[in-house]
Amino acid sequence: MCTGRVDPAHILRAFSNGVDGVFIGGCRLGECNYITQGNYHALNLVLLFRKILEHIGVNPERLRIDFMSGSEGNVYVEVVNNFINKVKELGPLGKSEGIDEELLKLKMQALTQLVPYLRVMGSERLRVKLGSARQEYEDYYASEGLDKLFRELIADKLSISEIMLLLRERPLSSGEMSETLGLTPSEISRYLHTSARHGLVRYVDNRWRLALA
């Protein structure tokens, strides 16, 4: 299968099921067997998703992509073995990062809801010109410009998705949501203001707690 067919949902499904690491192997950049340059799309996806993992508190080293030709079986074995050893060193998903199991589950659910949106952003707004060298991709995803775009296009929407999932269970105060999600009270207030403006939440209990509208 061409790595260009790898979808955010595939990676999310693996981590949501408790897999400790995900490895994607593809043909060498510039040597696509299907002339679709799908390996560049996969590289873009992985770098974006590593940033997402880091944002939610998961070690981004749990997701790796490497490229090799079909004749380089020895390279494949070496790369995979190195990745397996790295994942063993990292330990169990979530637990090693100090993330509560239920909170990690909620974050994965919130990400799953954003999959259609991530597909669009990954292919249109958050990507490097097709055919660029791998280092250009990595430099781009480490840049301040990308950080700003990431906050605006991904991080804010992810936080709102997490808040909506919390409020689906029961009404909560902004303080309770702040404590659960690890966000500052000002961040919670900003996201709630946006959600209220769009008619997604409403105040209850004399405006002390909030619930889904």
Image: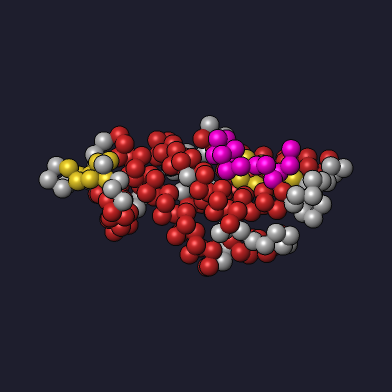
- Which image quadrant: the N terminus? top right
The picture places residue 111, in percent across and down from the top left corner, at: 47, 43
On whether residue 201 falls in the magenta region, the answer is no
The picture places residue 173, in percent across and down from the top left corner, at: 22, 46
Q: Nearer the viewer, residue 147 or 74?
A: 147
Q: Look at the picture and state if 58 lies above or below 15.
A: below
Toward which corner of the image does residue 194 lie, by quadrant? bottom left
Q: Please name the residue shown 87% across and 42% down the image.
A: 71
Taking the view exactly as shown, the residue that stands out farthest to the top is 17
Taking the view exactly as shown, the residue that stands out farthest to the front is 198
On whether residue 2 falls in the magenta region, the answer is yes
The picture places residue 107, in percent across and down from the top left corner, at: 43, 42
In this image, 21 relative to 96: left or right?
Answer: right
Q: How is the image coloured?
A: secondary structure
Toward which corner of the image does residue 20 lie, by quadrant? top right
Q: Please name the residue shown 51% across and 43% down the image.
A: 115
- Which image quadrant: the C terminus? top left
In this image, 198 relative to 39: left or right?
Answer: left
The picture places residue 148, in percent across and down from the top left corner, at: 48, 64
Do we see residue 16 in this rendering? yes
Report the span colored magenta.
1-14
Q: Please name the residue shown 40% across and 35% down the image.
A: 102
Secondary structure mostly seen in magenta is helix
Q: Nearer the viewer, residue 14 or 78?
A: 14
Do we see residue 177 in this rendering? no
